């Protein structure tokens, strides 16, 4: 029985994950694609950006683990047999990394870091005031959203969470439904997209939403590029709703050289690094799911393939 790692373009992570898995459980046979001994022995695959048509080579595949939180490339793959279970790999460091990113992005914007950097270049001393209260709307209050909410609450931001079911968690006010979203977005200083990409959430950051945003507000997209209608954002930034966008994910990655986002003064770009999966923490979760697969026990972080997340 073999556990195969299929992460083209992430050779360093693949090697480190394989080493961590072997250290945790010497009985697991770990291979790194495209080096596969006997495809018939492969029962579990850890995947990220897998090539088209991969699954057909592995007739005895039972479980696929995403090397991260997002699973849109797995649940959206009609070639993946329905009998194969899908899990996410979400260790604590992923949510902490996301919390750090969002808190940093909001602080940098509220506290004028870009302006001070420019002022420093001109030896210019120009103190700015900043708003003393801040309300943040999280689109998605799952594993990432909860970590972000805790970190924002710790610095006294008010947090509102928009989810499919709209349940309140801890101090977070919970809402659901598109009308409620359009209503609340006009009252918040920052909107953060932390949604999974599904047919229901694709293109959610569009002109309808932007037209209802508070003038001068900040948009952060750390979900997926396909949540955002790019042309709508450029028009909306021209109208100050939102005033600035921090974008970590894009429809095409890497962002093409000639893309207008690169030079837009109201857009801050990071290269899909908001939260990185740590091979060590991931290996613990993956090895546990390997054990559970053979014990017939409930899997960690199993995805509802119908629901899409
Ligand atoms: P979870 O599955 O834990 O949470 C998803 C949340 O989205 C839930 O609150 C869910 O609502 C809500 N949701 C799903 N569908 C809808 C809908 N149609 N309408 C309203 N709310 C909806 O996911 P995670 O928090 O772990 O991750 C979220 C996403 O973050 C990932 O899928 C990935 O795309 C992105 N991500 C990006 C990273 C980066 O580096 N940029 C790193 C890690 C993740 P409910 O609670 O009601 O079910
Ligand atoms: C993830 C990501 O989904 O890194 O984990 O985007």
Image (cartoon, rainbow, N blue to C red):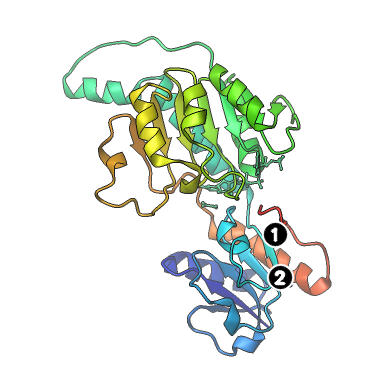
Instruction: Report whether residue 48 is seen.
Output: yes
Question: Which of 287 and 223 lies nearest the eye of the viewer?
Answer: 223
Using the image, determine if residue 184 lies above or below residue 76. above
Circle 2 crowding by C-alpha within 10 Å: few under 14, some 14–19, many from 20: few
Q: Label 1's element?
A: loop
Question: Which of 287 and 67 lies nearest the eye of the viewer?
Answer: 67
Using the image, determine if residue 70 lies above or below residue 181. below
N-terminal-most mark, 2 or 1: 2
Where is residue 96 shown, x and y percent of the image? Answer: 57, 41
Kindly identify the residue that appears in the image at 48 percent across and 72 percent down: 51
Question: Which of 174 and 39 lies nearest the eye of the viewer?
Answer: 174
Taking 56 as reference, is 11 left or right? left
Taking 144 as reference, is 82 left or right? right
| Label at residue 305 | 1
Task: Tell me the distance, in whole angstroms, between the alpha carbons under discs 2 and 1.
Answer: 9 Å
Contact, mark 2 vs mark 1 (Cβ under 8 Å):
yes
Where is residue 48 shown, x and y percent of the image? Answer: 52, 64
Residue under label 2: 82
């Amino acid at each position: 029985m073999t556990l195969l790692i299929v992460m083209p373009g992430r050779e360093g992570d693949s090697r480190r994950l394989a080493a961590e898995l072997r250290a945790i459980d010497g009985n697991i046979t770990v291979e790194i694609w495209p080096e596969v001994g006997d495809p018939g022995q492969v029962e579990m695959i850890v995947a990220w950006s897998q090539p088209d048509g991969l699954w057909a080579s592995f007739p005895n595949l039972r479980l696929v683990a995403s090397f991260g939180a997002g699973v849109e490339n797995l649940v959206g793959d009609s070639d993946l047999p329905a009998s194969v279970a899908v899990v996410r790999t979400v260790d604590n460091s992923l949510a902490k990394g996301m919390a750090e990113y969002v808190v940093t992005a909001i602080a940098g914007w509220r506290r004028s870091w870009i302006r001070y950097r420019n002022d420093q270049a001109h030896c210019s001393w120009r103190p700015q005031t900043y708003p003393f209260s801040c309300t943040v709307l999280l689109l998605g209050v799952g594993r990432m959203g909860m970590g972000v909410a805790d970190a924002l609450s710790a610095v006294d931001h008010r947090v509102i969470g928009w989810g499919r079911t709209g349940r309140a968690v801890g101090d977070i006010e919970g809402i659901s439904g598109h009308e409620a979203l359009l209503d609340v977005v006009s009252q918040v200083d920052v909107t953060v997209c932390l949604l999974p990409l599904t047919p229901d959430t694709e293109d959610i950051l569009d002109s309808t939403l932007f037209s209802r945003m508070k003038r001068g507000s900040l948009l952060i997209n750390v979900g997926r590029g396909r949540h955002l209608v790019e042309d709508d954002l450029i028009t909306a930034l021209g109208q100050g709703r939102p005033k600035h966008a921090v974008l970590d994910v894009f429809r095409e990655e890497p962002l093409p050289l000639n893309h207008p986002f690169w030079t837009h003064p109201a857009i801050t770009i990071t290269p899909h690094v908001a939260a990185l999966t740590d091979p060590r923490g991931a290996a613990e979760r993956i090895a546990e799911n390997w054990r559970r697969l053979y014990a017939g026990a409930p899997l960690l972080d199993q995805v509802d393939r119908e629901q899409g997340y």
